[in-house]
Amino acid sequence: MTTEPVFPEEPVLYEFQHGLKQIIKECMERGLCYASRWAAEMLNGMKPLDLDGAPFSSTPARDCAELSASDVTDALLERQEESKYFLGKSYFDCKEFERAAYALKDCKSSKCVFVALYSKYLVGEKRRDEENDEQLGVNDSAVIVNRELSAIAETLNALLNNGNNDPYLLYLQGVILRQRKQLEHAITYFLKCVSLRPFFWSAWQELSACLDSVETLTATMKLLPSDHIMTRIFFVFASHELHQVNSVVYEQLEEAERVFPSSVYLTTQRALLAYDARDFDEAEEMFEDILKNDPYRLDDMDTYSNILFVME
Amino acid sequence: MTTEPVFPEEPVLYEFQHGLKQIIKECMERGLCYASRWAAEMLNGMKPLDLDGAPFSSTPARDCAELSASDVTDALLERQEESKYFLGKSYFDCKEFERAAYALKDCKSSKCVFVALYSKYLVGEKRRDEENDEQLGVNDSAVIVNRELSAIAETLNALLNNGNNDPYLLYLQGVILRQRKQLEHAITYFLKCVSLRPFFWSAWQELSACLDSVETLTATMKLLPSDHIMTRIFFVFASHELHQVNSVVYEQLEEAERVFPSSVYLTTQRALLAYDARDFDEAEEMFEDILKNDPYRLDDMDTYSNILFVME
């Protein structure tokens, strides 16, 4: 006896839509453009929902009930610091990262602190790349690190040890720990982050990058809500990254496709699985289809180009 | 008998603050990062206003009264196209301009149309720069133009001739006309734009760039509301650009400084005027002061470096 596939109910779909829109806005406010891009692609991969059928408020009621005292304090701080935030974020948008961090240096709200620390992080990344370029060939074995990490970690530790639970600060802490090769520690931060913001894809990608074996993936899966749509999407991604694809991966992918029937991201995942299984004809057809819908897409086009080369 | 300087009343200051915040948000939504940066700097250059003293709504009542039927239609369209906007804007933020324009190609709301056309414009600018680089030295006299201009102008003409009055589309139309050397025509669009969005600095800068003589500046000034703070700031900027500085310019600058007592932008304007008057000591002191407050500022630092060189 086969069981009918369970289609997600409308209220659940509204919840996903709300979650994706929240991430898009929050990530745009924080300069996290790849995370907002992923969420926007998934949002557009859903079956369009009837606007009139949406719950009255765009914020599900339980969101308000869940607000802690520290969330309220943070929201008030954010309001007070609105003008400074505008200044720092507009410098950030003009790629003046050092200036953004400086403009926000006295801010206390989690949002402003994030933009300040993330700016510092980007300053450090840019400098590291420049220094690596300079010494290329001179002494390849010496790895230059991001020199801002210590200062950022110090600020983050003080805040997070003091009860701050902002999902984006938790994410940044994880990123820094991963750069410092403290993978287990990093994983705990990414898990906290995705439990608060399940649609924040960058945190899932970082989490996946911390997993170096099927065993760590299996252990991590046990800590995630097994029926959440994002757990499924993560499992497909992480399994493919570890080249550990089996029938469960395909089942999870199908579940995800039910919620996001026209997601170009999920079609790309399917094409990558076909490629890994050396089913080049199928993979090529899928990539053709992807490019018909999204002709300027660059993600994973290296694989497509490999396929075309192999099939010649 | 001297008259006392008139200090702006609190309600006027709230109106300025509201206008600046509106521009920051609208420009951030449209990828106009330099305009939002300027407005954010000016906002932070105001004396802090008491939040509790602010009018109840952040939108002055007359804004709603002024909403035309077409504004309402546009707002509804914008709501319907929210998901597409998120997609296009997130591509824009990731610098995928061609993809952004493609994602928004069927949109009808002024905001989405702006992001689509502005993306196309940037694609054309980038390509032009690349082609210019390639042919540098081969045939310097042939000027390569932005090849997207015709298509953008066609779309804009259809919309604007059909009654669309969106300030950002008017601005883009002006930018294209100026690139095509149709300066008089461009000026009319910039004037319409700043009458709708007085705090949108990029439009004022473009307007100034259309003026090639004191006569055209004088003629333009007659078409502007003489007592608006932005008319004053524009007059100082445009006079300096034309190297036509007299006592009226200083008076207008003083009026502006009353509203924005700690504006780094206005201090820089004052430093530039001192430099033009060959008062290097004063100019140097001002630049030193500017860098104390805004150590990562780059704007007009070429002038400061000239001053230091001359004074050696």
Image (tube, coloured by chain):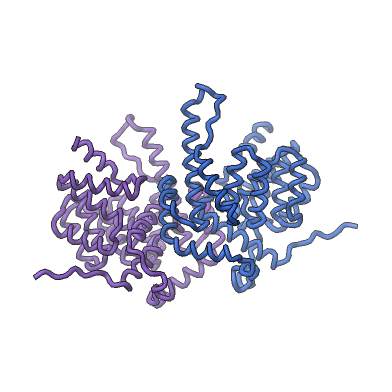
Chain colours: A blue, B purple
Q: Residue furthest left?
A: B1
Q: As displayed, is residue A244 above or below residue B89? A: above
In x, y percent, where is residue B139?
31, 32
Task: Please give the name of the residue rendered at 67% of the width and 35% of the height, measured from the top-left corner.
Answer: A307
Residues B192 and A21: in front is A21
Q: Is residue B135 above or below residue A173?
A: above
* Residue at left offset 22%, top offset 52%: B270
How far across and down, in percent of the image, does residue A32 sit?
A: 53, 50
Q: Residue at x 80, y 59 (%)?
A: A5
> Of B173 and B14, which appears nearest the observer?
B14
Is residue B93 something one can see in this rendering? Answer: yes
Image coordinates of residue B119 in percent, x first then y, are 45, 51
Q: Nearer the viewer, residue A150 or B159?
A: A150
- Would residue A45 be visible to someone looking at this image? no
Locate the C terminus of chain B by quadrant.
top left
Q: Is B52 displayed left or right of A11 in the figure?
A: left
Query: Image height check: is A253 above or below B191?
Result: above
Q: Where is residue A131? Give x, y as percent.
A: 47, 31
Residue B219 lies in what quarter of the image? bottom left
Q: Is residue B266 left or right of residue B116?
A: left
